Image (cartoon, rainbow, N blue to C red):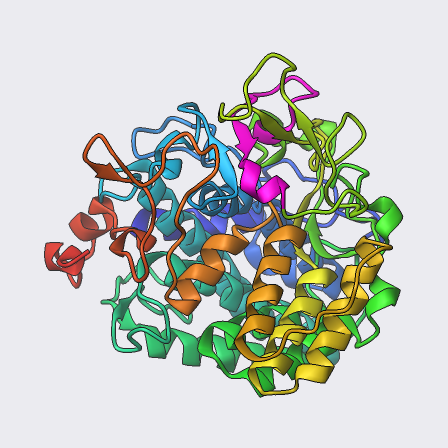
Amino acid sequence: MKNIVRNITAALVSVICLGSCSQEFLDEVKPTTGVPIESIYESRATAEGAMAGILRRFRGQFENAAGVATTDVGGLNSIFYARSVKGNDVISTTSWYGTDYENNNREPTYRRPTFTWNYPFFMINQVNNFIKQVNASTKIVEDDKNELLGQAYALRAFFYHQLVLEFSKSYNEDQNYPAPPIYKEPTVEPKGMSTVKEVYDFMVDDLTTAIPLLSEDRLGKSFVNKEVANAILAQVYQVMGKWDLAEAAAVEAYGGNVTSVLDAGGYGSGFKDNASVEWLWGSPQRPDQSNYYYLAPHAFSDHRSPGYYSAYVNSTFVSLFSATDVRGGVGPTKLFNKKSATLPSTDYRYYVSNKFSFTFSSHSPIIRYAEMILVDAEAKARQGNNGGAKTVLFALQKNRDANAVQSSNTGQALIDEILVERRKELFLENGVEWFDAKRLGKGMPRDGNQRLKGPNAGVTYDLQAHDLRFMLKVPQSEIDANPFIDNTVNNGK
């Protein structure tokens, strides 16, 4: 933790707003020496430059404990993609993310736990320093301060959600289970573990504080506004099972008009441009500021461009889509394709995905409006509003498939249908299959043409309900550096 905090000031000093701040993402600035940190917070514009620098770190080439940058720790989307390969819909080779696919990249000295702990805390500490400096500024007017602080509170909650999802049991399984420490201000003084309930209470407090401070305006889709903060809150309430609040937050996030935030015609355009009307929050990049081959899932799942060609698609997942669904179909211009005409259908390499197009300027989705539409549908169904849930669900389904027929399901059958729709809609984006299984205490049994499934050579690769492998172990580096956390933190994991 101490090593992370030491870098905060340097990271913020290196980010100053140059020129106009109206562009989609502020130009990355070269490190500057001898600049008092207070000068970064002399105006809203310069503070927004500091925020742009924080947002730039959503992607990057991060180093492991040995000081070596590795391809499977490329920022936020590497966390999302590691979740995606743990389930049944995606199949990974033994290349990058192969041990995540095997569900064994979780030991205290392994790369996934170390990165997934250190990276969110790095981001949280940058945000905490931002909050401190904005509050201390005598130059930024109150209204501007509020909007800047609203962005920061929402970002802090977002990264705490990633931590508690990865290192603790789910909220509805054990609210008293140990969770990562809560840091509300920049500090080099370590703290002990919190609890799951404490983290969720903290996130709700941050988000409900942030939302009234924010407006719908923002510099670009990489920045947080009121809609984004509501979307993060909807995800938090979804895990907590607070369905009335999840519904309200989701509707605030997407606006309540399903068709106005969907574009079926653009679904097959490669998921590489956050200018799409469907993207609520996304991380852009350009060739001279690229994440290059670290960009997940693009560099791993796109078999049409030079990349790793390491992700394949389970045949049972492909079969969920009708031939007229814009999210499915098999062929060069469809969302799935056959890798080779000579491979048998039982081969794990049989199907590949065309969803993500990989270039050095491809953007990364963080939250799309469709996710909020499906949160709304699920929340309505879980509150017994079957009619409302089916109306919202069908509006999305009809947009994706002109031949869709409205569901006749009710109760649990309707909820199950919505959960399948979430997998179909958000495939490869954010680890939705893993997220839903963990929050609901379900397993992810593997079937179809999976490369590794069930008991295999004495190893059970499927994740069972409440499987301990849904959790990463606290990194040994944190245990060694933090006097308030010892090896017992991983007991029973």
Q: For residue 382, which quarter of the picture?
A: bottom right
Q: Position of residue 370 (x, y in %)?
A: 72, 61
Residue drawn at 77 percent across, 61 percent down: 397
Seen from the viewer's position, the closer of residues 81 and 91 is: 91
The residue furthest top is 342
User: Per the image, is 492 magenta?
Assistant: no
Q: Does residue 194 appear in this view?
A: yes
Read off the magenta span.
300-319
Residue drawn at 48 percent across, 75 percent down: 203
Q: Does residue 186 appear in this view?
A: no
187 vs 184: above or below: above
Count how many numbered circles sit on residues in the image.
Answer: 0
Say left or right for 193 vs 260.
Answer: left
Residue drawn at 65 percent across, 79 percent down: 249
Residue drawn at 51 percent across, 47 percent down: 80
Q: Locate the C terminus by quadrant.
A: bottom left
Q: Position of residue 416 (x, y in %)?
A: 55, 67
The residue furthest front is 408
Say left or right for 389 vs 291.
Answer: right
Q: Position of residue 480 (x, y in %)?
A: 16, 48
434 vs 358: above or below: below
Seen from the viewer's position, the closer of residues 1 and 58 is: 58
Q: Position of residue 92 (x, y in %)?
A: 46, 31
Say left or right for 137 vs 64.
Answer: right
Q: For residue 453, which quarter of the picture?
A: top left
